[in-house]
Image (tube, rainbow, N blue to C red):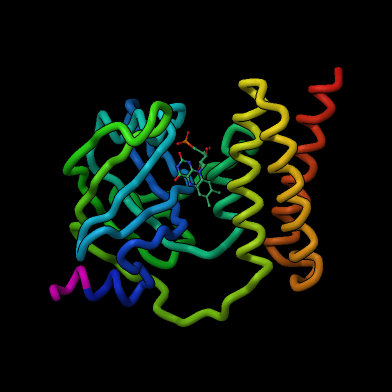
Amino acid sequence: MNEVSRELTKLGFEKGSIVETILVTRNPDGTLNPAPMGIARIDSEILEIKPFKSSSTYQNLRLYPEAGVNITNNPEIFYFTAFKEENAISFSIDKIFSLKGSDATLIVKVIDMKDFSEDRALFTTQVRSVMIRNPSPKVFSRGKAAAIEATIHATRIKEYLKIGLIYDAEKLMAKVYECKEIIEKVSGSETPERRVINELLKMIKGWRDELSK
Ligand SMILES: Cc1cc2nc3c(=O)[nH]c(=O)nc-3n(C[C@H](O)[C@H](O)[C@H](O)COP(=O)(O)O)c2cc1C
């Protein structure tokens, strides 16, 4: 096992499992674009990324085959990077794709690209380097996990409503409400996860109101 592979294992990347990260890619104008993306480790230094073709991440990876996989469990980083259009927030990212506030960054290079399905691509990447900024262990929080779960559902709700799949959107809205219950049970009122769920519910209400007009 080489150094990169050992570091990936230490960070919690297991073969065959998907983990949630913030992927930073390069926009055509040279600025950097952060977006939450699931990443699967399929071999010792090989990671797979499956962006929807509707995402900027997909367009960017096709044009510029290098990216940064940023690791965090902060729900607010997931929320703000998923909903950049709704929140005029600027992210501090350095030129090697590392997002301020993340615990570690992996630099990856695209080595293959193909279709995964009609609306999704599959990029195979090789990890070139690993930078760890926060090596301290953290406890598992159901509230943080639920806030990240609710954010991923909200990204699909937005997309489904856009293309008129109301029933699918409603099913995911019910899941967001389940996440809300978990967060209210286990997370304090001043936590990032409470702020995230409140913002998501506000956004969903706005989308609903828009629909019933
Ligand atoms: C935890 C989490 C995981 C996500 N995983 C993916 C993914 O694997 N592929 C994808 O296309 N979108 C995924 N999304 C949704 C995108 O992050 C979201 O659509 C985002 O706005 C895309 O940004 P972009 O257009 O800048 O690429 C995920 C969202 C969250 C919150």
Residue 204 image point, x, y percent: 76, 38
In this view, 208 is above or below 111? above
Residue 158 image point, x, y percent: 64, 32
Quarter in which the C terminus is drawn: top right
In this view, 90 is above or below 94? above
Q: State how many labels appear.
A: 0
Quarter in which the N terminus is drawn: bottom left
Q: Residue furthest top?
A: 213
Q: Magenta residues: mostly which secondary structure?
A: helix
Please provide the residue range marked out in magenta: 1-5
Q: Is residue 6 left or right of residue 138?
A: left
Taking the spot 48% from the left edge, 48% from the top edge, the residue there is 36
Q: Quadrant of residue 156?
A: top right
Q: Which of these two is toward me, 167 or 8?
A: 167
Q: Which of these two is toward me, 172 or 32?
A: 172
Residue 61 image point, x, y percent: 30, 35
